[in-house]
Image (cartoon, rainbow, N blue to C red):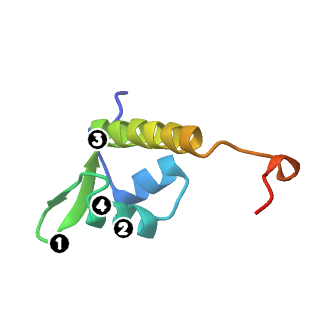
Amino acid sequence: MASPRFLTLADVAEVLNTSSAQVYALVRRGDLPAIKIGGRGQWRVESEQLEQFIERMYAETRTFVDEHPYVEAAERPEP
């Protein structure tokens, strides 16, 4: 069976191993594109958008790590 095109915020939270509230915050900030559907305005995230978000987060993490290399406490310069 093919995976669904659209996911609920709870589905996205499960994939990302986080809370629905955190996913809602990502959507409301515009970090994770989503649509509102139906009379009750339920949020849905397209599977492809979720995959693109994950790729962006990997890229941002790589950039952060490159710009902030891990240094053991013994190797840190004195202030």
Q: Are marks 4 and 2 in contact (CB under 8 Å)?
A: yes
Side (left or right) of 21 relative to 36 = right
- Amino acid type, residue under disc 2 in the picture: Ala
Residue 27 numbered mark, or none: 4
Q: Are marks 4 and 1 in contact (CB under 8 Å)?
A: no
Q: Position of residue 13 (x, y in %)?
A: 46, 56
Q: Position of residue 9 (x, y in %)?
A: 36, 59
In whole angstroms, how far apart are the C-alphas of marks 2 and 3? 16 Å
Label 1 element class: loop
Q: Nearer the viewer, mark 4 or mark 1?
A: 4
- The residue located at (45%, 43%) in the rendering is 60
Residue under label 1, please give it: 40
Furthest toward the top, the residue is 1
- The residue located at (33%, 37%) in the rendering is 52
Q: Position of residue 7 (x, y in %)?
A: 32, 48
Q: Residues within 10 Å of mark 2 (few under 14, many from 20)?
A: few
Label 4 element class: helix
Q: Are marks 2 and 1 in contact (CB under 8 Å)?
A: no
Furthest toward the front, the residue is 79
Furthest toward the left, the residue is 39
Question: Which quadrant of the structure image shows residue 59?
Answer: top left
Label 2 element class: helix
Residue 15 numbered mark, or none: none
Q: Nearer the viewer, mark 2 or mark 1?
A: 2
Q: Is residue 42 above or below residue 11?
A: below
